[in-house]
């Protein structure tokens, strides 16, 4: 259970970094920051996308979180 919690926390930290500094965080930079491989970072990003976050990664740029559209309540 401890490993799942650590992975969840790391995923949230990655999301926060991407949100704060769009295009600044590549797989390599995130991997160095967290001491994991680029492939591991890719898996975290895939998990975030699967959870509904629109994360884009233009060629030669870092990750970018696309804001969700807000619905008006009637």
Image (cartoon, rainbow, N blue to C red):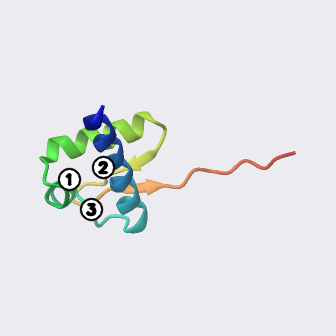
Q: Position of residue 41 (x, y in %)?
A: 22, 46
Q: Nearer the viewer, residue 45 or 23?
A: 45
Identify the residue position indicated by label 1 in the image. 27
At a point 46% along the width and 46% down the height, the residue shown is: 54
How many numbered dots are placed on residues in this image? 3
Q: Residue 25 at x, y = what percent?
A: 27, 62
Q: Which mark is residue 61?
A: none
Residue highlighted by disc 2: 10
Residue 51 image-quadrant placement:
top left
Residue located farthest toward the right when viewing the structure as drawn:
74
Identify the secondary structure beneath mark 2: helix
Q: Nearer the viewer, residue 19 or 62?
A: 19
Q: Position of residue 42 (x, y in %)?
A: 24, 42
Residue under pointer 3: 25
Q: CA distance from mark 3 to mark 1?
A: 7 Å
Give the quadrant of the N terminus: top left
Position in image of residue 72 (x %, y %):
78, 50
| Front-lying residue, 29 or 10 | 10
């Amino acid at each position: 259970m401890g490993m799942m919690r650590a992975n969840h926390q790391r995923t949230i930290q990655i999301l926060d970094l991407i949100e704060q500094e769009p295009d600044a965080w590549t797989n390599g930079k995130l991997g160095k920051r967290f001491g994991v491989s680029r492939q591991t970072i890719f898996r975290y990003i895939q998990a975030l996308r699967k959870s509904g976050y629109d994360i884009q990664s233009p060629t030669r740029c870092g990750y970018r979180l696309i804001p969700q559209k807000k619905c008006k309540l009637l």
